Image (tube, rainbow, N blue to C red):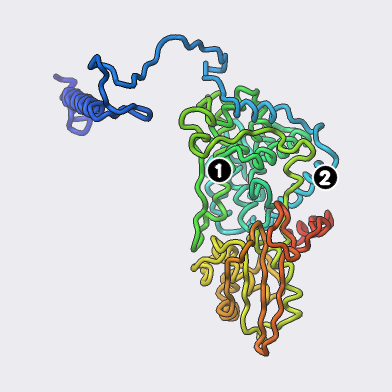
């Protein structure tokens, strides 16, 4: 009794007897609810209708389990057997080495890295990036750590991946192709490579593997291929790499950044699953195991999205990274080919000569819906095709300074936007297929087709001219980086 009175004084006024009574009541309630659920035919997914069989005990369609299963997976902590899809992914990823890259693929990796460094520099001092770095500064690593680029401090691997990925994505200046803005995951490889003192060849092999897995669509937005690429650099064996994959994928299936008026999350959305993928690899590195069958198991990705057989590499002749497109302008992907035509448009019509501008594109979606006609922050402005087109016609180009408050609230730009219409173009598909028609006040009209007039843009090809030669040269990558550093 003395202990009970002490517990009452020390706690919330309830003694152990009271807590035991409460616990018994909760158990009784749960038991009663379970009986009621069974009487209604409940009991979980796959439960047959509550129709009794002839014996009055079993269901008419009996569901039974019995002895016979033998555990043979022999995995760490006696985890269950990995599914075939996981095995295909981790076996290929761990077996992929720098020596398997062709000369052309090595050259493309050099371009990818230089392009991504330009994107990193361009986003360094943006408000949401500074806030992401502030979040990372709250964590001081005691074991594995990495650097937040340009900010002068170390943090944990997942927070470093988050802050640096936010930096590289914010200005919408990084690559685009099979798998999306694939270079978003590179900061996880920076983090893991720095922590493990990886060689340059190990680092580039992990980048190449990540690009291939992203193009294969192994799920979870950016998290799954990030977890595998980072886990490869953490030198995980196949067993632990499978854990990195499932710990990155299973809890982290992401939604989109939203439409309409954009928030800071537009620039941070990709960084979050990159962080989660890195965290999955860290957990696996420490020995934590995850659900063994994230694809083919009950409730796995294939049951949610439909089965997809994955063969790696996707094309034996060339890795997916060879199909990436790169941006000349820090703006939304489908604007790139239209922006290539700006010099010709401006030569044809001065802004004060324009009566109307009609623009047809592949989809209005997130770049021409209602809030994009009145942008009030950077995130909305750089995904507003009406604003991008108006600003480029006024200034002659789109660059980092095009998205300041003064620019997107500029009365001249807002007035020109009133003369622009955006329409869904018949048969226009792919990234950048578009047609702009400018009618002058004197009645003259001229059409400016993007993508060389193609209505179906090929994968990974952002420029307007329909030739591979129009893709960025190495000199242009260097110039892109140098200008971002100014």
* Disc 1: which residue: 273
139 sits to left or right of 324: left
Residue 69: image location, x then y, percent: 48, 12
Q: Is residue 161 above or below residue 410?
A: above
Residue 289 lies, with reference to residue 342, above or below; the image says above
Label 1 environment density (alpha carbons within 10 Å; few <14, some 14–19, many ≥20): many
User: Which numbered tag is attached to residue 478?
Assistant: none
- Percent coordinates x, y for residue 485 in the rendering: 73, 59
Q: Residue at x 23, y 17 (%)?
A: 56
Distance between mark 1 and mark 2 Cα atoms: 28 Å
Q: Let me know if residue 198 appears in the view.
A: yes
Residue at screen point 53% across, 30% down? 294
Report which residue position mark 2 lands on: 107
Residue 205: quadrant of the picture:
top right
Residue pictured at 58% horizontal, 76% vertical = 417
Q: Secondary structure at mark 1?
A: helix
Residue extending furthest toward the bottom: 442
In this view of the protein, which residue sits in the foreground, 376 or 105? 105
Work out whether residue 19 can be spotted. no
In percent of the image, x 55 and y 35: which residue is there?
A: 307
Is the residue 220 above or below the residue 378 in the image? above
First in sequence, mark 1 or 2: give its number.
2
The C terminus sits in image quarter: bottom right
Q: Secondary structure at mark 2?
A: helix
**Location of residue 224 by image quarter:** top right
């Amino acid at each position: 009794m003395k202990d009970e009175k002490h517990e009452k004084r020390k706690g919330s006024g309830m003694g152990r007897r009271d807590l035991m009574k409460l616990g018994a009541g909760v158990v009784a309630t749960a038991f009663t609810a379970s009986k009621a659920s069974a009487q209604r035919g409940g009991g979980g997914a796959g439960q047959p209708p509550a129709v009794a069989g002839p014996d009055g005990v079993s269901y008419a369609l009996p569901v039974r389990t019995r002895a016979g299963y033998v555990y043979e997976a022999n995995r760490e902590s006696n985890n269950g057997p990995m599914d075939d899809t996981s095995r295909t992914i981790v076996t290929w990823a761990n077996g992929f080495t720098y020596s398997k890259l062709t000369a052309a693929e090595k050259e493309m990796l050099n371009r990818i890295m230089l392009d991504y460094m330009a994107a990193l520099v361009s986003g360094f001092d943006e408000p949401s990036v500074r806030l992401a770095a502030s979040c990372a500064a709250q964590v001081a690593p005691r074991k594995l750590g990495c650097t937040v680029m340009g900010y002068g401090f170390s943090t944990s691997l997942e927070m470093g991946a988050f802050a640096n990925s936010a930096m590289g994505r914010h200005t919408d200046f990084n690559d685009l192709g099979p798998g999306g803005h694939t270079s978003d995951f590179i900061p996880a490889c920076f983090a893991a490579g720095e922590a493990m003192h990886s060689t340059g060849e190990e680092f580039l092999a992990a980048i190449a593997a990540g690009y291939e897995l992203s193009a294969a669509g192994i799920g979870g937005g950016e998290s799954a291929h990030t977890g595998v690429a980072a886990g490869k650099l953490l030198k995980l064996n196949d067993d632990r790499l499978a854990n990195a994959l499932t710990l990155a994928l299973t809890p982290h299936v992401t939604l989109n950044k939203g439409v309409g008026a954009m928030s800071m999350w537009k620039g941070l959305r990709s960084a979050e699953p990159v962080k989660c993928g890195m965290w999955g690899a860290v957990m696996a590195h420490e020995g934590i195991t995850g659900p063994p069958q994230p694809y083919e198991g009950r409730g796995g990705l294939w049951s949610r999205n439909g089965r997809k057989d994955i063969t790696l590499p996707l094309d034996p002749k060339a890795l997916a990274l060879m199909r990436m497109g790169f941006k000349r302008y820090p703006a939304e992907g489908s604007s790139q080919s239209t922006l290539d035509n700006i010099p010709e448009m401006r030569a044809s019509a001065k802004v004060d000569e324009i009566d109307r501008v009609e623009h047809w594109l592949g989809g209005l979606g997130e770049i021409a819906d209602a809030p994009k006609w009145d942008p009030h922050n950077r995130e909305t402005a750089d995904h507003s095709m009406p604003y991008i087109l108006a600003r480029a016609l006024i200034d002659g180009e789109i660059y980092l300074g095009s998205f300041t408050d003064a620019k997107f609230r500029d009365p001249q730009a807002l007035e020109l936007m009133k003369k622009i219409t955006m329409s869904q173009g018949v048969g226009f598909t792919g990234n950048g297929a578009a047609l702009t028609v400018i009618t002058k006040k004197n009645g003259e009209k001229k059409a400016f087709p993007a993508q060389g007039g193609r209505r179906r843009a090929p994968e990974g090809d952002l420029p307007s001219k329909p030739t591979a030669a129009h893709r960025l040269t190495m000199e242009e990558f260097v110039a892109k980086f140098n200008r971002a550093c100014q």
